[in-house]
Each structure stands twice: as C-alpha cells, then as structure tokens.
Amino acid sequence: MSELYLGLMSGTSMDGVDAVLCEFDDSRFVRVAHSQAGSYPATLRTELLRLQRERSAITLATLARLDHAVAQCFARVARTLLKRARVVPAQVRGVGSHGQTVFHDPKGVRSSLQLGDPSAIAAATGIATVADFRRADIARGGQGAPLVPAFHHAVFADAHEPRCVLNLGGIANVTVLPDADASRVRGFDTGPASGLMDEWISARRGLPYDAGGRWAATGATHDVLLEALISEPYFRRKPPKSTGRDVFNTAWLRRRFPRLRTLRPQDVQRTLADLTVRSVADAIRAHAPVTRRVLVCGGGVNNPLLMGSLALELAGMTVETTSKHGLDPQHVEAAAFAWLAMRTLNGLSGSLPAVTGATRAAVLGGIYRA
C-alpha cells in the first residue's frame, strides 16, 4: 500500500527551500508526486549566511528568532505544495525536514545544528514532522553527514554498473555505488561547489549567483591560484569526511592566496569553477576509479561550464543528470529527507556507518507530533 511523505530541504547554498511530495510503496520509493520551491526573505538569508560562514557570536534571542523564521519559511512552502496538489494533511503520513544547517563540527564540538523548529512545522502543516537527523549518527561516532547516500543507494544503485552520484550544492558531495550491496556504499564531501562561487560573485558584483556560469566563462583559469587552492589538506584527507561553508569561504580564499586582489575577478570565478571540477574528479579517481557512470544532481547541473568541464575531466565515464534515471536533479535531496522520515516513522535505520564512520546504524531524527 502506497503512502505519501513530504520532504523539505535547504542546503548550504541557501538559495531556497525545496519541497517534494513523495509516494512510497512498501517502504520503496515510487515517485515525486508534486514539488514546490520557495525562497528566504533577503534579510533572513543574509543573516543565515553570515552565521554559517563566520560562526559569529549571537544572542540566544537572535538564535531563537532565526529558528522560528526558518520554520515559518519551511511550513509556508509545505502548505503551498499541499494546496496546489489538492492534498489534505491527513493524506500525508509524515514530513521530513532537514532544516537549515548553521553549525557542523562532528569531531571537535561533536554536534550539528539545523534551524527550523520542527514543532512549529508540525503545528503549521498538521503533519507529524521528523527532524534533527544528524545528531544520532554523531552520537555514535559518525560525521552526521552525508546522510543522502542511503537514499542514493535505494534509488540509483545498479548491480552490474559501478556508479557515483554527485551532488553539486553549496558543497559538493559524492556517493560511491560500486554495485547493489549497501555495505559497499561510500559517501563524503569533496569540497566547495556553488557556495564559494556564489560568495565571490556576491562580493564582487552584488549578484546572488553566477547564472549559467556565464561570468566565469568570460574569465581564464589562473593556474597558480588553482594550485594554491587544490593544495588545501582537506582534499587529501581520506573519507569519511565532511565540510561546509565555514571552512570554504572567501576568507579561506584570501588565506590560501594573499595576492587575490591583483587578479581579475572573472578569472577568480573561473578558477573557482575549475577548483570544483578538479576536486570532484580527483576524489572520484582516488576513491571510485572503476566508476562508469556519474549521476549529477543539485543546483550545479544548471551551470553548463561546470557540467561540460566535468565531462571532459572525467573522460571515459558517462556524466549525466539524475533526470535520466527518473528523478529531477532539483528534487533528489528533498526526496531523500522524505525517505528518511519514512524510515524513521517505520522504526528503520536511515544511516550507513560505512559512509559516516559511526559505530553502528541508527534510526535518525526525532518525531514531532502535529
């Protein structure tokens, strides 16, 4: 018997809230029945970006205000989706809300913080909400990230073809799917993707992102800059590993290359695109050399420069979007959290210890009743 679950996601790029209504049949993903996208108010996005990037000190009142504001945005997008789909809350078994990550330090502080009060979302939608997915894994010694590889395996694994799923969000992450065996799945963050490029174009041109990679395409790769950036030790660390915009930001860029201001801004943008491509390709060659097909999702699929460069860099592998395999690239992550909510509400584990480094699998998240 099929059931409906609603997934809510906003990633490190913070370019908006994605909502999908997913159908599952006997716990197996069937399809995305409906989708909806929304955006943060500009002032809220600015505050969240600053908090995530700078780890700035704020008052508890401010933190509580942001927690409520994010929840209201998530709930508004969810309600709009339900209205457009003509689905009433009683028809949806659960909501899986990733929330907005503003702090992630699984090895030092041993915690991860996502804003977006799940009780407020449950009350506003009238649907039981599952949230705070990462901390159960961290409590068991894991990175708490990435969590989506379990879903990637369920939907995209092939018994006869080694594959990778590449998510190009604010941070790039890759899921290695050697075959259909879940115990062989690996996943990790490769480094920066859209987040660093977005931050640079915002600082230099006042734009939220480089539409279609057009500004980067006017620049030329600065080889010395690229080598300075790719020498960052994170890229050579072995998985499991995860990172964020608190590490890869323009302050990091200036530390790695103090003469940054002497370069043409468009050349920096092009080099940042090359950094994404190079770090992703190096990671796949190092940790999944037999890969035959790379399935790409996330906002980066809308950047022809990135996609074309990846295809050239990964010559010998087929590089294509997840739409070729039945799931829109913009829907993958939100669908994953609908799937994780389904797993949690059915008492099933949602983590892969081989991916996160945890000592054992866990039922992820807390359940907040409507």
Image (spheres, rainbow, N blue to C red):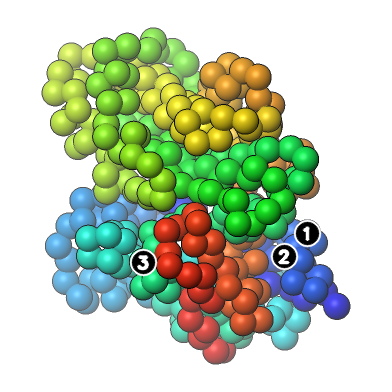
Q: CA distance from mark 3 to mark 2?
A: 31 Å
For the residue marked with disc 3, what is the amino acid?
Answer: Gly
What residue lies at 77% left-to-right and 40% top-to-bottom?
Answer: 160
Q: Residue 341: horizontal and vertical position, in percent?
A: 60, 73
Q: Nearer the viewer, mark 3 or mark 1?
A: 3
Q: CA distance from mark 1 to mark 2?
A: 6 Å
For the residue marked with disc 2, what is the amino acid?
Answer: Cys
To which residue does mark 3 refer?
141
To which residue does mark 2 refer?
22
Describe residue 354's horizontal placement relative to residue 344 as left or right. left
To which residue does mark 1 refer?
31
Instruction: Check disc 3: other Cα within 10 Å, few if <14, some if 14-19, many if 20+.
Output: some
Q: Quadrant of residue 128?
A: bottom right
> In front: 349, or 92?
349
Extreme residue in the bottom direction: 369
Label 2: element kind: strand
Q: Residue 73: horizontal and vertical position, in percent?
A: 48, 66
Which part of the image, by quadrant, shows the N terminus?
bottom right
Q: Is residue 8 visible?
A: no
Q: CA distance from mark 3 to mark 1?
A: 33 Å
Describe residue 85's horizontal placement relative to residue 242 as left or right. right
Label 3: element kind: loop
What residue lies at 36% left-to-right and 73% top-to-bottom?
Answer: 139
What residue lies at 61% left-to-right and 18% top-to-bottom?
Answer: 315
Label 1: element kind: strand
